[in-house]
Image: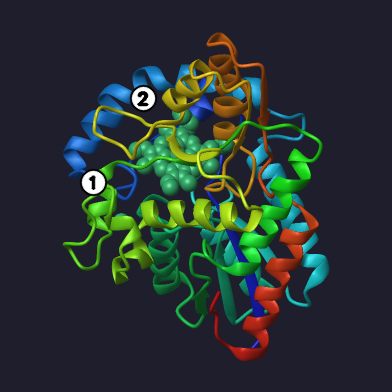
Amino acid sequence: MKKGILLVNLGSPDSPNPKDVKTYLDEFLMDPRVIDVPFWLRSFIVRGIVLNTRPKASAAAYQKIWWEEGSPLIVISERLQEKVQQQVEMPVGLAMRYGSMTIKKGLQDLVDKGVEEVLLIPLYPQFAMATTETILVLAKDIRKTDFPNLKITDLPAFYNNPDYIEVLSNSISRHLKGKNIDHLLFSYHGVPERHIKKSDITKSHCKIDGSCCVTASKAHQFCYRHQCFEVTRLVAEKLQLEEGKYSTSFQSRLGFDPWLQPYTDRTIERLGTQSVKNMAVVTPAFVSDCLETLEEIAMEGEEIFHEVGGENFTTIPCLNDDQEWVDLLAKWINTWVTTETVTV
Ligand SMILES: C=CC1=C(C)c2cc3[nH]c(cc4nc(cc5[nH]c(cc1n2)c(C)c5CCC(=O)O)C(CCC(=O)O)=C4C)c(C)c3C=C
Ligand SMILES: [Fe+2]
Ligand SMILES: [Fe+2]
């Protein structure tokens, strides 16, 4: 069977103009795994409220980070795709969950090249229903309706894979070389607390208290919160970070429901106020730089830090098309080719 790879990332608007941003946000926020309330309520919230104001504000933010070649997230994902393609002997495609580069087109391109078996790689280290799950569910629906003979296997969340932790740790070390950092903040994209409870396969483990995420449970296979704290713990161990000199927070909350805490903006403010002068932020929920890293952290985060007296603020780039990251993806792909299984 001829094999192929489909890398899948989140997606971006076609342009940073309010009209394109609105189209993109409509598709994104109407996804029942992103805003997980009944359709009528989601329509009311998204189409009746959010889309009346947010596209203009989001477009202004996108305009600050947009590159000549396009959206950073898309351009970086394309660079990654090209580099992975150079390392493996089967077609490597790229698709986005939202926007014009659809999963259907990505699968069609592979099928047109004679591919019969696809390894789908969601470009997220941690599992979340708003990211990995929505990709897998959509890909399976598309397979059923359009490509019934195509075999699809997916790469599971790789948050605790030792090679991934090493690549991430090496990248952090490289970007902090020669810098004197008082505090390293691991900032992950937030999700509503409700999402964590919904993904709990035991239905009783995740209480989002101080202990559930550090108490072993099979719920952790799908617990975004646990997986984020694990990345921090494993990287801190690898880099021998001193207790108290690093912490975890969650960014990009939207709406009024409780989201995972502590919140990144308040954490940066607190650290700056508590006399941290030199801080760095790493964002391991994203493998490609995007609006959330380039604007929310590198611009807004830095501004908050300086306002409260902080001096040096370093935003560590995502893995992007880092050669060690490319090599690791190629290693996972080649393992799948030779063993027919994917375990990370
Ligand atoms: C209820 C809303 C949202 C949930 C839940 C959510 C989860 C989530 N998102 C990412 C990764 C990215 N999100 C990005 C942008 C973005 N996210 C939301 C909302 C939710 N995300 C919105 C409305 C937006 C658009 C921008 C804005 O208006 O604020 C991006 C950047 C995309 C880009 O084009 O650069 C990424 C990447 C993860 C990993 C995640 C859950 C774990
Ligand atoms: Fe998001
Ligand atoms: Fe947990």
Q: Nearer the viewer, residue 257 or 7?
A: 257
What x and y, as percent, mark residue 242?
Answer: 58, 45
Rendered image: mark on residue 119: none
Q: Residue at x 49, y 19 (%)?
A: 274
- Residue 1 seen in this snapshot: yes
What amino acid is labelled 1 in the image? Answer: Arg
Residue indicated by mark 2: 51
Q: Position of residue 149 (x, y in %)?
A: 49, 83
Residue situated in front as seen by the camera: 161 or 287? 161
- Name the residue type under label 2: Leu
In the picture, measured across the screen, residue 222 lies left or right of residue 208, that is: right
The residue tagged with tag 2: helix, strand or loop? helix
Q: Are marks 2 and 1 in contact (CB under 8 Å)?
A: no
**Nearer-N-terminus badge (2/1):** 2
Give the residue pinned by disc 1: 194
Q: Residue at x 45, y 79 (%)?
A: 148
Instruction: Indicate the quadrant of ligand 3 in the picture.
Output: bottom left
Q: What residue do we see at 67% from left, 32% from top?
A: 181
Rendered residue at 73%/47% (across/down): 173
Query: Considering only vertical position in the picture, is 246 above or below 291?
Result: below
Estimate the x, y position of residue 66 in percent, counting from the top left.
67, 27
Residue neighbourhood size for the residue with mark 2, other residues' Cα within 10 Å, grouped as few (<14), some (14–19), many (≥20): some
Measured as percent of width and height from the top left, residue 29 is found at 36, 38
